[in-house]
Image (cartoon, helix red, strand yellow):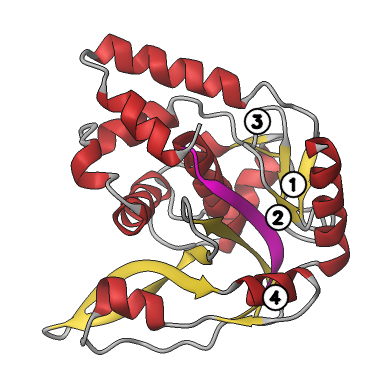
Amino acid sequence: MTFKEFKEEYKKLESAEERKNFINNRIQALISDDSLERIGKNLTGSYRGFITPNMGVVSNASGFFADLKMDDLDVFEEFMNYFDNDIDEYLRGEPITIQVIQSFIWYYFGYNDSGVLARMDIYLSNKPVSVKDLKFKDIAACSERSAMVQNILKFLGFDSEIVFGKLNGGSHAYIIFRPEGSDIHILYDPMNPVEYFVNDKKVYRPGVSLMTEEQYIQLQNGGSYSFNYDLVKKLFIKNNKYTFDEKIYTSDEIKYKKDIEETNELKR
């Protein structure tokens, strides 16, 4: 199911019960592939599928932040209810959809990671950790936020992947997706929104950056990608002043190539 097909099918639904049944059926179709036990740092360079409840997500090389379970299956109905199921207003195209997803991620997890020790305590106290353990706590980091975004994008029918690589040399998870019917790629970092100012008031919008096919291939092959502000300026910032942060993204080249080969093998 593509993003366009999702919207067309969902708009036909007239009652809350019909919408609930549609969402449940969609989830069941997505969790049917449970081929991997764990994904994440030092395990997978990229993962293009839906992260099922039985998978564990590993967010750092030491394995300390490991075995996060994306087991909140109510989140998809919660996401649709978040904007009152208004497909035409809030899911009419990729830019507004990503903005709604970013807003929902802030609602679900709270704002950016404000307590490493509190996050460590959750992982020490719970084995495995449910994503629900992080809800509303302001402690979720890049892996949890990107995993949630990946699942929402797959639920909506996007061609997307979660990448376990690096940002400015430090371990980092982020998203790359391809707009429907397009040859371009967009890097989306749910952990690092863009900050700009309207009448001296700070405003935050999704950290999205346009990638050419050549840049995408370079990233897969171990090259770096420098976050470009042109897209976010065009979509959100306009002529307003913004905070420029140099952000250099890399991937785990060896794991990335292995994942691509395995994905291509499955398609044959």
| Nearer to the camera, 54 or 46 | 46
Image location of residue 170, percent across then percent down: 70, 75
Q: Residue furthest left?
A: 199
**Which residue is tagged 4?**
170
**Which residue is tagged 1?**
66
**Which residue is tagged 2?**
59
Image location of residue 264, percent across then percent down: 81, 46
Does the magenta run of residues contain 159? yes
Residues rendered magenta in the picture:
157-166
Amino acid found under the numbered disc labelled 4: Gly
Q: Nearer the viewer, mark 3 or mark 1?
A: 3
Question: Does residue 26 sit above or below 61 in this rendering?
Answer: above
Q: Residue at x 27, y 72 (%)?
A: 236
Q: Residue at x 52, y 44 (%)?
A: 148
Give how far apart the Cα atoms at labels 3 and 1 are.
15 Å
**Which residue is tagged 3?**
52
Q: Is residue 256 left or right of residue 118?
A: right
